[in-house]
Image (cartoon, rainbow, N blue to C red):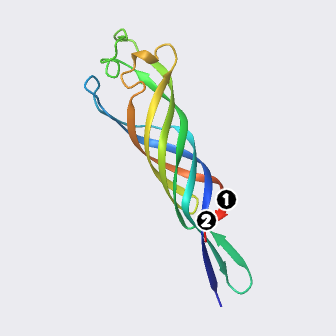
Amino acid sequence: KNEVLSIDQAACQIGAVTIPFKARLGTNTQYENFTSDFNAGLYIGYSPFGKIRYEYDGSKTSVSQPFNLTFGFTFGFSTEELDEHNTAWSEKKLPTPQKSTIGLFSSSLTTMLAYKKFRIGLHLGIDTGIGSKSDYWDHNNQLWLGIGFGYNLYSGFWKEKE
């Protein structure tokens, strides 16, 4: 005879994340841009609505956390190749036809929906260029909206809800 017990629990979540799709929001001096590239990051969040499920099948107990919603922050790194197309609006102009690559530090507010250890998330963030030519980039320190995917590395349960 199977017995199942589900308990509401809040938890701290830490995991790996990639945000392959970003829509860079335009302003009156910048254009909108959609990018699709590889990046790697870390998310740290809090899941106030989590559930933990205990299932006993008569011989052993299994524990799972089927669905939860996490709110938190994401930090990561990637690169951006600068050219005449993504430096046209900045105050500093990149000499044409010169190209250069800068590093990017990305940070975002994150909402992740999880099934077991896999996550899909919505991110609102900022990319900050790293390097002497980062001021040439049109989207330096500008907002973007992204869709990301993650994998939970740690889930520490803090307290049980009554």
Q: Which disc, if any, is residue 158?
A: 1
Q: Which amino acid is tagged 2?
A: Gln
Closer to the camera, 21 or 42? 42
Percent position of residue 23, x then y: 35, 38
Q: Which residue is mark 2?
A: 9
- Closest to the observer, 16 or 13: 13
Which secondary structure lies at badge 2? strand
CB atoms of marks 2 and 1 within 8 Å: yes
Kind of residue sitting beneath label 1: Trp
Q: Residue at x 55, y 59 (%)?
A: 48
Residue 115: % across, % down: 52, 63
Q: Residue at the spot x=41%, y=43% of the render?
A: 146
- Identify the residue at the far top of this view: 95
Secondary structure, mark 1, is: strand
Q: Is residue 38 above or below residue 96?
A: below
Q: Could you say which quadrant of the image residue 140 lies in?
A: top left
> For the residues marked 2 and 1, what is the alpha-carbon distance in whole angstroms?
7 Å
